[in-house]
């Protein structure tokens, strides 16, 4: 049995068991994103850029582990060195995190957020990078299952927030990703044959913990466990 076959085979337990990582996903979904201020939404934007940097790294690891998986290869074309996020003066084929960085810098948000959250961003990246390559690859496949719902919750931030400080670009990123990930034949469907188990739980816990940095979210009862 090849390493790829062992990873891609569906496990009955994976279909029925409620894994611990799902608890962290549910807590994220339960956070009061509708209470975010404009400044707090910028914090979420910056943290999403940090997460996207790590996603690109993990996706490239996935490519090395599963170079012959056709669905993954098709998904990669929609995430790395692509023009599918083209907006305003961002038209070149680049990774998705580069889209976020471009508009964070263009609107003067990157410097502000790095001063506030840069130290915590490095801790998040270190925690993710400490995971073994197979687990990091699995986090990619789990994100394709979970992120469209999480991104939809970000969009529940008040409508007036999106009119300031380049946040329209973040909204474009979110709405485009929801379509890319959750539409029929989209990125989730392309990678849905990969097994996901609870080894991804530390990743989702680290992702959840980043939301403690946002005051309106940190005050939420969703942190109680």
Image: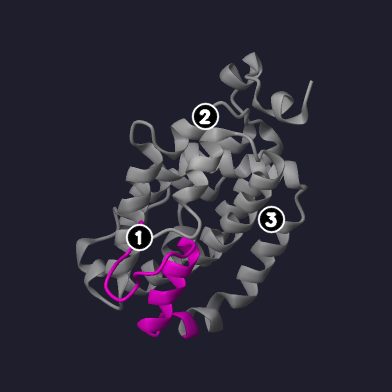
Per the model, the C-alpha gap separating discs 1 and 3 is 25 Å
Q: Nearer the viewer, residue 23 or 129?
A: 129
What stretch of residues is rendered in magenta?
A: 84-111
Q: Is residue 120 magenta?
A: no
Q: What residue lies at 47% left-to-right and 84% top-to-bottom?
A: 112
Q: Secondary structure at mark 2?
A: loop
Q: Quadrant of the C terminus?
A: top right
In this rendering, the label closer to the viewer, 2 or 3: 2
Q: Where's residue 201, x and y in %? A: 66, 41
Residue 75's label in the rendered image is: none
Q: Which residue is mark 2?
A: 192
Q: Where's residue 192, x and y in %? A: 52, 29
Q: Which residue is mark 1?
A: 85
Please report whichever mark, 1 or 3, sits nearer to the chain's N-terminal start.
1
Per the model, the C-alpha gap separating discs 2 and 3 is 22 Å
Q: Which residue is mark 3?
A: 128
Dot 2 surroundings within 10 Å: few (below 14), some, or many (20 or more)? some
Q: Quadrant of the N terminus?
A: top right
């Amino acid at each position: 049995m090849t390493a790829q076959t062992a990873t891609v085979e569906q496990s009955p337990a994976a279909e029925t068991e409620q894994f611990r990582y799902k608890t962290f996903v549910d807590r994220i979904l339960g956070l009061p994103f509708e209470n975010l201020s404009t400044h707090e939404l910028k914090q979420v934007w910056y943290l999403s850029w940090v997460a996207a940097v790590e996603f690109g790294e993990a996706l490239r690891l996935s490519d090395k582990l599963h170079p012959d998986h056709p669905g993954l290869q098709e998904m990669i074309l929609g995430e790395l060195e692509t023009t599918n996020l083209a907006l305003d003066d961002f038209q070149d084929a680049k990774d998705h995190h580069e889209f976020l960085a471009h508009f964070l810098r263009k609107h003067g948000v990157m410097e502000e957020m790095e001063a506030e959250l840069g130290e915590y961003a490095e801790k998040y990246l270190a925690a993710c990078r400490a995971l073994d390559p197979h687990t990091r690859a699995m986090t990619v496949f789990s994100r394709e299952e979970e992120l469209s719902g999480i991104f939809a919750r970000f969009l529940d931030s008040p409508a007036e927030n999106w009119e300031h400080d380049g946040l329209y670009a973040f909204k474009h990123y979110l709405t485009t990703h929801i379509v890319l990930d959750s539409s029929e034949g989209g990125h989730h469907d392309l990678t849905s044959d990969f097994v996901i188990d609870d080894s991804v739980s530390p990743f989702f816990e680290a992702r959840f913990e980043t939301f403690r940095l946002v005051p309106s979210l940190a005050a939420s009862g969703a942190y109680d466990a």
